[in-house]
Amino acid sequence: MNKRFNFVLLSFLVLGIAFMAGCSSASTNSTQPTLRSKYLLNTTISVKPDHSTEGRRLAYYDVPFKITSAMINPTVQGIISAIGGMGPYASLYVLDDSSFKNWINRNEGVTMLYSLGAEMVATMNVSITAPGTYHLVFYQTPIIIPGGALIDRPAKVGAHIKLQWYQ
Protein backbone atom coordinates (compact mmCIF):
# COMPACT_ATOMS: atom_id res chain seq x y z
CA MET A 1 0.00 0.00 0.00
CA ASN A 2 2.87 2.35 0.70
CA LYS A 3 4.16 1.92 -2.87
CA ARG A 4 0.71 2.65 -4.27
CA PHE A 5 0.39 5.78 -2.11
CA ASN A 6 3.83 6.99 -3.27
CA PHE A 7 2.88 6.32 -6.91
CA VAL A 8 -0.38 8.31 -6.60
CA LEU A 9 1.43 11.14 -4.79
CA LEU A 10 4.17 11.18 -7.42
CA SER A 11 1.55 11.18 -10.22
CA PHE A 12 -0.26 14.19 -8.71
CA LEU A 13 3.04 15.96 -8.26
CA VAL A 14 4.03 15.38 -11.91
CA LEU A 15 0.59 16.46 -13.14
CA GLY A 16 0.72 19.56 -10.94
CA ILE A 17 4.15 20.54 -12.24
CA ALA A 18 3.03 19.92 -15.84
CA PHE A 19 -0.09 22.04 -15.24
CA MET A 20 1.95 24.88 -13.70
CA ALA A 21 4.45 24.75 -16.57
CA GLY A 22 1.57 24.88 -19.06
CA CYS A 23 0.04 27.91 -17.32
CA SER A 24 3.25 29.84 -17.16
CA SER A 25 4.19 29.14 -20.78
CA ALA A 26 0.72 30.18 -21.95
CA SER A 27 0.94 33.50 -20.14
CA THR A 28 4.44 34.30 -21.42
CA ASN A 29 3.53 33.36 -25.00
CA SER A 30 0.38 35.50 -25.17
CA THR A 31 0.49 38.26 -27.75
CA GLN A 32 -0.39 41.55 -26.12
CA PRO A 33 -0.35 44.62 -28.39
CA THR A 34 2.79 46.71 -28.01
CA LEU A 35 2.61 50.49 -27.65
CA ARG A 36 4.55 52.23 -30.42
CA SER A 37 5.15 55.86 -31.25
CA LYS A 38 7.05 58.14 -33.59
CA TYR A 39 7.46 61.90 -33.70
CA LEU A 40 5.68 63.67 -36.51
CA LEU A 41 7.27 66.94 -35.46
CA ASN A 42 9.71 67.71 -32.66
CA THR A 43 11.13 71.12 -33.46
CA THR A 44 10.43 74.83 -33.86
CA ILE A 45 8.85 75.77 -37.17
CA SER A 46 8.16 79.03 -38.95
CA VAL A 47 4.72 79.46 -40.56
CA LYS A 48 4.50 82.24 -43.15
CA PRO A 49 1.27 84.23 -43.47
CA ASP A 50 -0.94 83.34 -46.42
CA HIS A 51 -1.92 86.45 -48.40
CA SER A 52 -4.04 84.59 -50.93
CA THR A 53 -7.75 85.35 -50.64
CA GLU A 54 -9.06 83.35 -53.58
CA GLY A 55 -8.14 80.10 -55.22
CA ARG A 56 -5.49 77.80 -53.84
CA ARG A 57 -3.97 78.44 -50.40
CA LEU A 58 -0.31 79.27 -50.88
CA ALA A 59 1.39 79.33 -47.49
CA TYR A 60 1.05 76.55 -44.90
CA TYR A 61 3.25 73.99 -43.16
CA ASP A 62 2.16 70.41 -43.88
CA VAL A 63 3.29 67.20 -42.19
CA PRO A 64 1.68 64.21 -43.96
CA PHE A 65 1.50 60.85 -42.19
CA LYS A 66 -0.02 57.43 -42.85
CA ILE A 67 -2.26 55.24 -40.71
CA THR A 68 -2.28 51.54 -41.63
CA SER A 69 -4.89 48.90 -40.84
CA ALA A 70 -2.33 47.19 -38.57
CA MET A 71 -2.33 50.20 -36.21
CA ILE A 72 -4.69 49.79 -33.25
CA ASN A 73 -6.14 52.95 -31.65
CA PRO A 74 -3.83 55.47 -33.36
CA THR A 75 -3.70 58.92 -31.79
CA VAL A 76 -1.89 62.15 -32.56
CA GLN A 77 -0.69 63.72 -29.30
CA GLY A 78 1.40 66.71 -28.48
CA ILE A 79 2.12 70.14 -27.15
CA ILE A 80 2.13 73.25 -29.33
CA SER A 81 3.48 76.58 -28.09
CA ALA A 82 3.80 80.01 -29.68
CA ILE A 83 7.32 81.38 -29.50
CA GLY A 84 8.23 85.06 -29.42
CA GLY A 85 5.62 86.72 -27.26
CA MET A 86 3.05 88.89 -29.02
CA GLY A 87 2.01 86.80 -32.02
CA PRO A 88 1.32 86.17 -34.70
CA TYR A 89 0.08 82.69 -33.87
CA ALA A 90 -0.51 79.82 -36.28
CA SER A 91 -3.64 77.68 -36.37
CA LEU A 92 -3.30 73.89 -36.42
CA TYR A 93 -5.52 71.36 -38.17
CA VAL A 94 -5.55 67.57 -38.53
CA LEU A 95 -7.20 66.60 -41.82
CA ASP A 96 -7.67 63.43 -43.83
CA ASP A 97 -6.29 63.50 -47.38
CA SER A 98 -9.58 64.40 -49.08
CA SER A 99 -10.31 67.24 -46.65
CA PHE A 100 -6.73 68.50 -47.00
CA LYS A 101 -7.14 68.80 -50.79
CA ASN A 102 -10.50 70.55 -50.34
CA TRP A 103 -9.01 72.90 -47.72
CA ILE A 104 -6.08 73.89 -49.99
CA ASN A 105 -8.49 74.69 -52.84
CA ARG A 106 -11.01 76.42 -50.54
CA ASN A 107 -13.71 73.90 -51.49
CA GLU A 108 -16.62 72.69 -49.41
CA GLY A 109 -16.45 69.31 -47.70
CA VAL A 110 -13.64 69.96 -45.24
CA THR A 111 -13.96 67.80 -42.14
CA MET A 112 -11.42 68.72 -39.50
CA LEU A 113 -10.46 65.97 -37.08
CA TYR A 114 -8.82 68.67 -34.98
CA SER A 115 -8.81 72.45 -35.17
CA LEU A 116 -6.87 74.78 -32.92
CA GLY A 117 -7.15 78.51 -33.33
CA ALA A 118 -4.39 80.93 -32.49
CA GLU A 119 -3.34 79.92 -28.97
CA MET A 120 -0.21 80.57 -26.92
CA VAL A 121 0.05 76.99 -25.61
CA ALA A 122 -2.14 73.97 -26.25
CA THR A 123 -2.14 70.20 -25.93
CA MET A 124 -3.74 67.86 -28.41
CA ASN A 125 -4.95 64.27 -28.36
CA VAL A 126 -6.72 63.23 -31.57
CA SER A 127 -7.99 59.71 -32.26
CA ILE A 128 -7.75 58.51 -35.85
CA THR A 129 -10.40 55.93 -36.71
CA ALA A 130 -9.58 54.76 -40.26
CA PRO A 131 -6.49 53.88 -42.29
CA GLY A 132 -5.31 56.44 -44.82
CA THR A 133 -3.13 59.50 -45.35
CA TYR A 134 -3.57 62.38 -42.93
CA HIS A 135 -2.09 65.86 -42.63
CA LEU A 136 -0.94 67.93 -39.68
CA VAL A 137 -1.30 71.48 -41.04
CA PHE A 138 -0.13 74.77 -39.54
CA TYR A 139 -1.65 77.88 -41.11
CA GLN A 140 -1.48 81.62 -40.52
CA THR A 141 -3.35 84.53 -42.01
CA PRO A 142 -1.91 88.06 -41.86
CA ILE A 143 -3.04 89.97 -38.78
CA ILE A 144 -4.44 93.48 -39.02
CA ILE A 145 -4.25 95.31 -35.69
CA PRO A 146 -6.38 98.30 -34.67
CA GLY A 147 -5.40 101.29 -36.78
CA GLY A 148 -4.98 99.13 -39.88
CA ALA A 149 -1.34 98.09 -39.38
CA LEU A 150 -0.45 94.66 -40.77
CA ILE A 151 1.60 92.15 -38.80
CA ASP A 152 3.23 90.26 -41.61
CA ARG A 153 5.92 88.15 -40.01
CA PRO A 154 6.01 84.37 -39.76
CA ALA A 155 4.58 82.70 -36.69
CA LYS A 156 7.13 80.66 -34.73
CA VAL A 157 5.73 77.49 -33.22
CA GLY A 158 7.32 74.94 -30.93
CA ALA A 159 5.71 71.64 -31.87
CA HIS A 160 6.27 68.34 -30.09
CA ILE A 161 3.73 66.05 -31.74
CA LYS A 162 3.86 62.28 -32.00
CA LEU A 163 1.80 59.50 -33.50
CA GLN A 164 1.07 56.73 -31.01
CA TRP A 165 -0.60 53.35 -31.63
CA TYR A 166 -0.69 49.71 -30.57
CA GLN A 167 0.45 46.93 -32.83
Image (cartoon, rainbow, N blue to C red):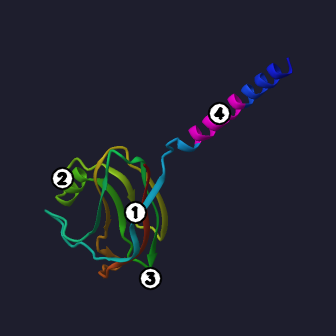
**Of the residues shown, which amino acid type is indicated by label 1?**
Gly
Judging depth in this view, the residue of 4 and 97 nearest the camera is 4
Q: Name the residue under label 4.
A: 18
Residue 107: mark: 2
Q: Residue at x 24, y 51 (%)?
A: 99
Q: Are marks 3 and 2 in contact (CB under 8 Å)?
A: no
Q: Is mark 2 on a helix, strand or loop?
A: loop
Read off the magenta span: 14-27
Q: For the residues marked 3 and 2, what is the alpha-carbon distance in whole angstroms? A: 33 Å
**Of the residues shown, which amino acid type is indicated by label 2?**
Asn
Q: Residue at x 47, y 81 (%)?
A: 85
Local crowd size for mark 3, using a 10 Å CA cut-off: few (<14), some (14–19), many (≥20): few
**Of the residues shown, which amino acid type is indicated by label 4?**
Ala
Compared with residue 4, is residue 86 higher up or lower down, i.e. above or below? below
Judging depth in this view, the residue of 103 and 132 nearest the camera is 132
Q: Mark 3 points at which residue?
A: 84
Q: Is mark 3 on a helix, strand or loop?
A: loop
Q: Name the residue under label 1.
A: 117
**Of the residues shown, which amino acid type is indicated by label 3?**
Gly
Q: For the residues marked 2 and 4, what is the alpha-carbon distance in whole angstroms? A: 67 Å
